[in-house]
Image (cartoon, helix red, strand yellow):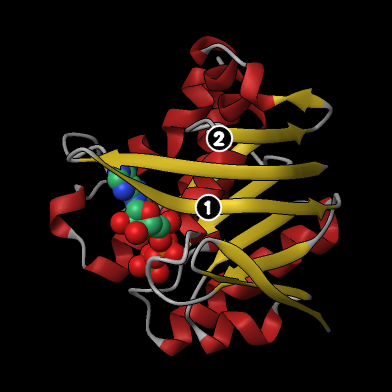
Amino acid sequence: MIEIRNVGKVFNIGGHQLHALKNISIEIASGEFSGFIGPSGSGKTTLLNLIGALDKPTTGRIKLMDRQLETFSPREAAAIRAKDIGFIFQSYYLLPHYSVFENVEYPLLLLKEPREQRSEAVRKALEWVGLADRASSRPSQLSGGQSQRVAIARAMVKQPKLVLADEPTANLDKENSNIILDVMEQLNRDLGTTFIFSTHDEKVIRRLRRVITLEDGQVQNEATG
Ligand SMILES: Nc1ncnc2c1ncn2[C@@H]1O[C@H](COP(=O)(O)OP(=O)(O)OP(=O)(O)O)[C@@H](O)[C@H]1O
Ligand SMILES: [Mg+2]
């Protein structure tokens, strides 16, 4: 599903160059439940952003579902994100003036799904994350963990082929983390959804079937289990 070949990413900050990723090569198959771990600043979020076509590599190539991402126009990148990728961001990026329901519905509006199917899918996604009773709340009325769960519902509502989850349990207690992880494992099993995490959370790491450790922008080691 994903082929990352000799990828480097350099950020220019205040006249000096920061090498966030250095010559990364990884392949990820369809249906994997895998994740990146490693110290803060090791490049996990940067790599997820490249896989999700939110940013382009400075060097190297990334193939996602048989498409060469580094050649994509912003419009093509937006189209592939809308259709095939669900993002769970480290900061949730909920739309503050929209209700919980509308936030989760938003990806389906982009895909022009009919209203009845949208409502049904949103109801189901909110049930997955245990927030069916908060559909009409605004993001400002939610706790951090509840906001995180809305972001998770929004990423999964369209049942995308690929979910990129950047520290999805960072603001969740143990019980809610486990509920969310159960839902993710179920989607992985039943629909074959590919999941790629970035995480520091032992509860997540224990469930990953493949763990790729990044250090200083490089793959340091890899374990499957
Ligand atoms: N937009 C940006 N502009 C400049 N530097 C950036 C940018 N994004 C990331 N970096 C730098 O790239 C490096 C990797 O950052 P990244 O966010 O990928 O780390 P991370 O592994 O996700 O860390 P954490 O565990 O804290 O989330 C860091 O040194 C960071 O400061
Ligand atoms: Mg990060």
Quarter of the image with the N terminus is top right
Q: Is mark 1 within 8 Å of ligand 1?
A: yes
Q: x, y percentage for residue 85?
A: 62, 37
| Ligand 1 sits in quadrant | bottom left
Q: Which residue is mark 2?
A: 57
Q: In the picture, residue 57 is in which quadrant? A: top right
In the rendered image, the vertical position of residue 139 relative to residue 184, given as above or below:
above
Q: x, y percentage for residue 157?
A: 57, 43
Please give left or right for residue 99 compared with residue 68 in the image: left
Evaluate whether residue 123 shows in this view. Answer: no
In the rendered image, the vertical position of residue 223 relative to residue 174, given as above or below:
above
Q: Amino acid at mark 2?
A: Pro
In the rendered image, the vertical position of residue 84 relative to residue 135, given as above or below:
above
Which of the two residues, 191 or 85, is positioned nearer the viewer here? 85
Disc 1 crowd, CA 10 A, few/some/many (<14, 14-19, 20+): many
Q: Secondary structure at mark 2?
A: loop
Residue at 79 percent across and 42 percent down: it is 3
Please give left or right for residue 112 compared with residue 2 in the image: left
Residue at 55 percent across and 14 percent down: it is 112
Q: Which mark is residue 21?
A: 1
Which of the two residues, 214 or 152, is positioned nearer the viewer here? 214
Q: x, y percentage for residue 82?
A: 56, 26
Q: Are marks 1 and 2 in contact (CB under 8 Å)?
A: yes
